[in-house]
């Protein structure tokens, strides 16, 4: 990684920390500068403004999550393994990246608009198409029910996502890792072929 990439990564890491501690609206560019050790000029060189920085952080999180999920789905040998593996990945990713997940869940609500919202929408459409393509062989074999492509992610991750939201507020009360088998079974019940 070159010095420019390292500086950009440092700024994103500092921004995530500031956004987590203070919220997006309350965080200033100067807060990020102090936390990252970068100059104001360097921050503006990489990101047009605070909203651009938040958007870059949001897109980086989405990209990391989505690529990891695609990798898991690509390795599945059966419909059940695909569904349960996706839920396992979703929960483990949240456990490994709680600040990033918290930021991603609440960024759109706290920010008036994501600067690259059109890009995020386009990337989301591409991602959903990739997910549907990975589901298709199992749908054809009759191992997974056929739905519109927009439904697979909510059916896979809906219960997990809701529990993750609660867990982020009460991490000592909820054993998120221990809930994985139940969440996986719920997703499988939603997607398995009807008898």
Image: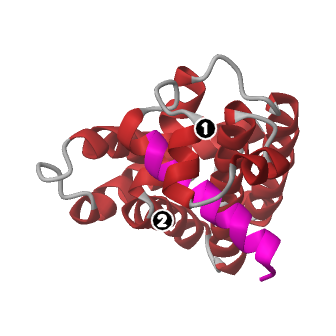
Residue 95 visible in the shown view: yes
Position above or below: 99 against 102 = below
Answer with mark 1 or mark 2, whichever residue precedes in sequence.
Answer: 1
Where on the picture, by quarter, is residue 161? top left
Q: Considering depth in this image, is 92 or 88 the residue closer to the camera?
A: 92
Find out whether residue 7 is within the magenta segment.
Answer: yes
Query: Which residue, given by chain and number where applicable, does mark 1 sit on?
Result: 29
In the rendered image, residue 31, in percent from the top left (x then y), is placed at: 50, 42
User: What's drawn in magenta, residue-wise?
Assistant: 1-19
Residue located 68% across and 58% down the image:
66
Q: Considering depth in this image, is 16 or 93 the residue closer to the camera?
A: 16
Left or right? Give the position of 27 relative to 150.
Answer: left
In the rendered image, residue 56, in percent from the top left (x then y), is placed at: 73, 47
SS at circle 2: helix
Query: Residue 84 shows which numbered tag?
Result: 2
Residue 70 visible in the shown view: no
Magenta span: chief secondary structure: helix
Residue located 38% across and 49% down the image:
186
Q: Considering depth in this image, is 74 or 109 the residue closer to the camera?
A: 109
């Amino acid at each position: 990684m070159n010095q420019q990439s390292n500086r950009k990564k440092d700024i994103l890491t500092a921004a995530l920390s500031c956004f987590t501690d203070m919220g997006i609206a309350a965080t200033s560019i100067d807060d990020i500068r102090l936390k990252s050790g970068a100059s104001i000029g360097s921050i503006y060189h990489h990101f047009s403004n605070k909203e651009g920085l938040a958007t870059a952080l949001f897109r980086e999180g989405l990209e990391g999550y989505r690529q990891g999920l695609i990798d898991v789905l690509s390795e599945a040998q059966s419909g059940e393994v695909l569904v349960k593996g996706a839920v396992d990945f979703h929960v483990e990713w949240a456990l490994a990246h709680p600040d990033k997940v918290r930021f991603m869940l609440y960024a759109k609500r706290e920010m008036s608009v994501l600067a690259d919202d059109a890009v995020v929408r386009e990337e989301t459409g591409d991602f959903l198409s990739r997910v549907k393509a990975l589901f298709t062989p199992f749908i054809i074999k009759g191992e997974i029910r056929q739905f519109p492509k927009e439904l697979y992610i909510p059916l896979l991750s809906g219960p997990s996502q809701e529990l993750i939201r609660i867990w982020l507020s009460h991490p000592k009360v909820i054993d998120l890792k221990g809930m994985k088998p139940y969440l996986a079974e719920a997703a499988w019940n939603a997607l398995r072929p009807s008898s």
